[in-house]
Each structure stands twice: as C-alpha cells, then as structure tokens.
Image (cartoon, rainbow, N blue to C red):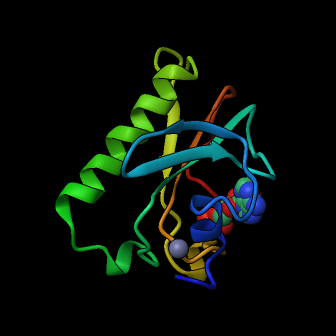
Amino acid sequence: MSDCLFCKIVAGEIPCTKVKEDDDYLAFRDISPQAPTHVLAIPKQHVPSLNEADDDAMLGGLVLFARDVAVEEGLAEDGYRVVLNTMAGAGQTVFHIHAHVLGGRAMGWPPG
Ligand code: AMP
Ligand code: ZN
C-alpha cells in the first residue's frame, strides 16, 4: 500500500535497522524502544490489523518468525512478550499488522 510506513520500509524507501528477513517477513528494531530489546516483526504483505487478517499461514508464520527473532536475540530462556496492538484503543498507531517482540527486562501484568 503506497501510503503505509511499514510498506515503505519493506520497499527500502524508509531505512530501518534490520534484524531478520525472509521472503515473507521482515523484523527491524523499533525506533522508540520500550524494553532493552524491542523488535517489530511484520509480514511483507499489507494487512492493516489483526481484524482484517484471514490467512492462517501468514499469521502462524508471523508468530513463528517473531519467536525466531526472540530466540536469536537471546530472549527465549528468560522470557519475552509478543504483542499485536489492534486498533487505536489498544495503542495501534501503524496500520500494517506487526508483532512487537519485547524482552530484556521483567514485564508487568496486566499490561497498561
Ligand atoms: P503500534 O503503536 O503498536 O502500532 O506500533 C508501532 C510501532 O512502530 C511503535 O512502537 C513505533 O515506535 C514504531 N515505529 C514508528 N515508526 C518507525 C520507524 N520508522 N522505524 C521503526 N519503528 C517505528
Ligand atoms: Zn503496509
């Protein structure tokens, strides 16, 4: 989608600090990290949010890709959180589905 920030990152039109990439997914460091490790994992395909997602393979692949990022970032043993903020009331500001991978500090519950 031409007007989408994360599609522009996928296209290389906006720079990112890339962490991991394959044919279908990209992971890069969040520009405003909320934890010592804060990576965004996205599908290259534009889907606005979890509300519109209907592709089991894409969603399952996104979660496993996020897991692989966490493992490669050394978070698997101590723990990490994978978050999909969905719509403005939950804090979604970029409407291209993305999984936050957060770790490197203790996480509170419930989330704010
Ligand atoms: P959300 O608020 O769940 O939609 O998450 C969007 C995330 O994108 C926020 O955590 C932002 O800090 C992050 N973000 C916005 N612009 C960029 C960018 N150019 N590069 C990396 N992360 C970004
Ligand atoms: Zn997009």
Residue 82, placed above or below residue 9? above
Q: In percent of the image, x 46 and y 20: which residue is there?
A: 76
Q: In percent of the image, x 25 and y 50: which residue is there?
A: 60
Q: Nearer the viewer, residue 52 or 1?
A: 1
Relative horizontal placement of residue 30, taking residue 2 as reference (left or right): right
Residue 56, placed above or below residue 102? below
Task: Name which quarter of the figure residue 52 lies in.
Answer: bottom left
Number of numbered tags placed on the structure image: 0
Relative horizontal placement of residue 14, taking residue 97 as reference (left or right): right
Q: Quadrant of the C terminus?
A: bottom right
Regarding ligand 1, which quadrant of the image does it lie in? bottom right
The picture places residue 19, in percent across and down from the top left corner, at 61, 35
The picture places residue 1, in percent across and down from the top left corner, at 52, 82
Q: Nearer the viewer, residue 68 or 13?
A: 13
Task: Name which quarter of the figure residue 105 lies in.
Answer: top right
Task: Name which quarter of the figure residue 92 lies in.
Answer: bottom right
The picture places residue 29, in percent across and down from the top left corner, at 69, 43
Relative horizontal placement of residue 45, taking residue 16 as reference (left or right): left
The picture places residue 34, in percent across and down from the top left corner, at 75, 46
Q: Residue furthest front?
A: 12
Residue 103, placed above or below residue 109? above
Q: Residue furthest right?
A: 32
Q: In percent of the image, x 63 and y 85: which residue is there?
A: 3
Q: In percent of the image, x 51 and y 48: which residue is there?
A: 26
Residue 68, placed above or below residue 72? below
